[in-house]
Image: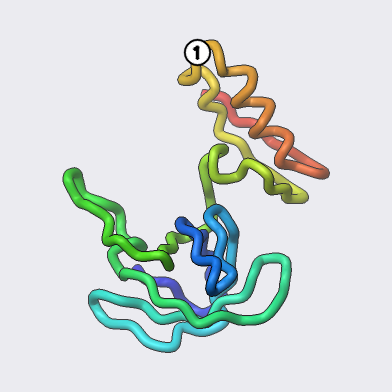
Amino acid sequence: PLPADGERVLCLRNNPGKGLLNGTLWDVQKVTGKNEHLVHMEITPEEGGFAREVTAPAKFFHPLAEGDEQWPTNQSFRFGYAMTVHKAQGSEWKDVLVFDESGLWGKEAVNWLYTAITRASDRVTVIRG
């Protein structure tokens, strides 16, 4: 599947010339063109602001098969409905859902969980496995 108008996407690489920062969320205002290799979108920042025209490889929106390599580009995006705690660092949302994977982090488990739950300003829900 490719993004459609109204979808949320996550920027994966910095592009200072376009004001794109790794880890930021964007709303697709309009898909302006697409083919099997590329998707052209008009996007606006999650927090509001002016629109930007970007192009991303279509394969970034499909699950990677083992051994796949990502195409080098400074305008890389993926669907932005979920992200890792690492990508979320420095950001805050009203409501946050955390799938607790702190057990994978050994001695850093407490730090990982702290970082995850402090992304929420109002409400956090933690799901433990």
What is the three-letter code of the residue carrying label 1?
Gly
Q: Is residue 110 above or below residue 10?
A: above
Look at 23% across and 77% down and name the residue there.
Answer: 36
As helix, strand or loop, the secondary structure at mark 1 comes to helix
Residue 120 picture quarter: top right
Q: Residue furthest right?
A: 122
Between residue 89 and residue 99, name the one nearer to us. 89
Tell me where residue 20 appears, x and y as whole percent: 55, 66
- The residue singled out by tag 1 in the image is 106
Is 68 placed left or right of 106 in the picture?
left
State the quadrant of the N terminus: bottom left
- Neighbourhood count class around disc 1 (C-alpha, 10 Å): few under 14, some 14–19, many 20 upward: few
Colour pattern: rainbow
Tell me where residue 85 appears, x and y as whole percent: 57, 38
Tell me where residue 44 appears, x and y as whole percent: 62, 75
Q: Is residue 25 above or below residue 42?
A: above
Between residue 85 and residue 128, name the one nearer to us. 85
Residue 109 picture quarter: top right
Q: Is residue 48 above or below residue 114?
A: below
Residue 77 picture quarter: bottom left
Q: Residue furthest left?
A: 67
Look at 52% across and 79% down and name the residue there.
Answer: 5
